Image (spheres, rainbow, N blue to C red):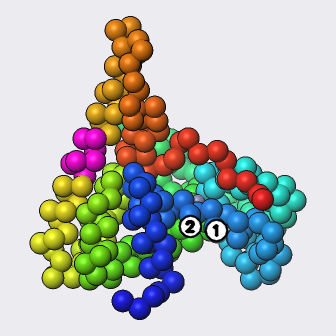
């Protein structure tokens, strides 16, 4: 296959020995995007980028990462114009606001529906998008596509067979993407392989976790921790696809 900009990171991820090669790719893409948004390239000073961040905003998890990265002034500038837009829209919503219907005297209490209150609809939509999540989704979609293209190569299939499986979140996405991306030629290889990888590697991490718990028994005094010291963080990764032991990603 022709060397393609995404084949290098995908190959690298499958050679990394990570508990999930897609977590590895996602972390790389996420850090690259955070650096792009708030890093030294100062993309936030470009009007077309600011126009997008003013519209989309950021989710809570990404604000936290932007804060940890540093560059307080950059963060302030991004939020300054974002907040201008929020205030402008809020004023408009406030002008046309009418009192919602009275609460019925009888019948079950239920939460307000967005379509009942335009202000609620607006607030929900305003807070539901994230520029960084969108970038990440776009990049992960490309990596999954590259993964399925690379399956044509026997050397790449061997790398997949030798990897440590996937986290549950990316296993789910792998099965979802397979529906549209997997060539018929590889169906009989793909499903048994990924299922075996999941069974063997979730089993292995469970053994590490069992060993870790066992080490807290007084009878284990002096015993070798084996591969269990980081069993808690690796199990969390296998379950939800995160790196809880990572220090915050920072500027420089
Ligand atoms: Zn993962
Ligand atoms: Zn986000």
Quadrant location, ligand no. 2:
bottom right
Report if residue 197 is visible in the image: yes
User: Of the numbered discs in the image, which one, if any, rests on residue 33?
Assistant: 1
Could you say which disc has been placed on residue 29 in the image? Answer: 2
Label 1 with label 2: CB-CB less than 8 Å? yes
Above or below residue 209? Residue 12 is below
Query: In the image, residue 88 lies at what x, y percent?
Result: 78, 67
**For the residues marked 1 and 2, what is the alpha-carbon distance in whole angstroms?**
6 Å
Decide: few, some or many residues near mark 2? Use Cα within 10 Å; few <14, some 14-19, many ≥20.
many
Residue 138 is a magenta residue: no
Foreground: 130 or 16? 16
Where residue 228 appears, as percent x and y from the top left, is 40, 32
On the image, which quarter does residue 86 sit in? Answer: bottom right
Residue located at (42% from left, 14% from top): 222
Q: Main secondary structure of the magenta part?
A: helix
Image check: 46 left or right of 56?
Answer: right
Q: Position of residue 53 (x, y in %)?
A: 70, 70
Q: Quadrant of the C terminus?
A: bottom right
Task: Determine whether the residue tagged by mark 1 lies in a helix, strand or loop.
Answer: helix
**Viewer-proximal residue among 243 and 57:** 243
Q: Is residue 146 above or below residue 232?
A: below
In depth, the one of 85 and 57 nearer the eye is 57
Range of magenta residues: 198-204
């Amino acid at each position: 296959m022709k060397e393609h900009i995404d084949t290098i990171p995908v190959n690298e991820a499958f050679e990394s020995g990570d508990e999930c090669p897609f977590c590895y790719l996602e972390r790389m893409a996420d850090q690259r995007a955070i650096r792009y948004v708030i890093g030294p390239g100062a993309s936030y000073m470009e009007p077309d980028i600011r126009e997008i961040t003013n519209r989309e905003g950021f989710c809570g998890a990404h604000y936290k990462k932007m804060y940890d990265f540093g560059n307080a002034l950059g963060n302030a500038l991004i939020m300054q114009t974002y907040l201008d837009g929020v205030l402008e829209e809020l004023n408009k919503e406030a002008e046309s606001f009418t009192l919602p219907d009275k609460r019925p005297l009888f019948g079950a209490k239920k939460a307000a529906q967005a379509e009942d209150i335009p202000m609620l609809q607006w607030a929900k939509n305003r807070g539901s998008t994230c520029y960084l999540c969108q970038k990440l989704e776009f990049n992960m979609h490309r990596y999954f596509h590259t993964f399925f293209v690379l399956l044509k190569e026997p050397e790449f299939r061997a790398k997949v067979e030798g990897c440590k499986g996937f986290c549950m979140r990316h296993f789910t996405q792998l099965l979802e993407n397979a529906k549209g991306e997997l060539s018929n030629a590889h169906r009989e290889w793909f499903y048994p392989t990924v299922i075996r990888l999941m069974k063997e590697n979730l089993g292995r991490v469970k053994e590490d976790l069992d060993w870790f718990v066992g080490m807290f028994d007084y009878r284990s005094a002096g015993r070798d921790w084996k591969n269990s010291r980081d069993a808690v963080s690796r199990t969390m990764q296998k379950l939800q696809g995160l790196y809880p032991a990572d220090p915050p990603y920072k500027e420089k």
